[in-house]
Amino acid sequence: MRVRLAIEEDHPWINNRYEQAGFLASNFSKETIAVAEIDGRKAGVGRLIPIDDNSFELGGIYVEEFFRGTGVAKSVIDFLLARAKSKIVYCIPLAHVVDLYRSIGFSEMDPTKVPQEVLDKFKWCEDRYPGGVGLLAMKV
């Protein structure tokens, strides 16, 4: 498996996957986006969205169905976290993958102690995803 920074040519594929998953579209010019490949095939994607000088939101982790269970999500997350050194990284994972983020080192957050932009996204996700979401963070 290879994880790399996305290039402009990847952007249509990325937003197509995000649309399929019901995620917000990517803003290529403002985000750090990672693409995982296995045997030359795009297997997964994720992004870091800047919040302020001290924090990011990690999100948009999507793995193609064929590659699920192969470690793609963790590889994408690790790749992105390596680019967030000395920052706080928030994430709002779907409820069924909260344990993956906890295993990496993320902890539950009190909604009153996160930046407004993160809180707004958390509320949007709560309304959008009926299975529920978590609100997690870690210092990288």
Image (cartoon, rainbow, N blue to C red):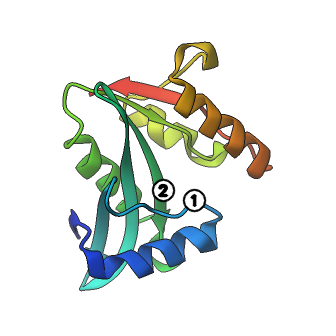
Disc 2: which residue: 60
Q: How many marks?
A: 2
| Position of the C terminus by quadrant | top left
Front residue of this view, candidates 52 and 5 = 52
Question: Vertically, is 54 above or below 134?
Answer: above
Q: Residue at x 78, y 44 (%)?
A: 127
Residue that sits furthest to the front in the current view? 29
Residue 4: x and y in percent read 20, 65
Q: Is residue 53 left or right of residue 45?
A: left
**Disc 1 vs disc 2: which is toward the camera?**
1
Q: Residue at x 20, y 43 (%)?
A: 83
Q: Amino acid at mark 1?
A: Leu
Question: Vertically, is 138 above or below 91?
Answer: above
State the SS at label 2: strand
Residue 120: x and y in percent read 63, 34
State the SS at label 1: loop
Residue 54: x and y in percent read 30, 24
- Mark 1 vs 2, N-terminal side: 1
Q: Are marks 1 and 2 in contact (CB under 8 Å)?
A: yes
Disc 1: which residue: 24
How crowded pointer 2 is (Cα within 10 Å; few <14, some 14-19, many 20+) is rated as many
Question: Vertically, is 52 above or below 9?
Answer: above
**Quarter of the image holding residue 7?**
bottom left
Question: Vertically, is 40 above or below 8?
Answer: below
Q: Residue at x 46, y 67 (%)?
A: 63
Residue 107: x and y in percent read 48, 23
Q: Is residue 44 left or right of residue 131?
A: left
Q: CA distance from mark 1 to mark 2?
A: 8 Å
Q: Residue at x 24, y 37 (%)?
A: 84
Q: Amino acid at mark 2?
A: Gly
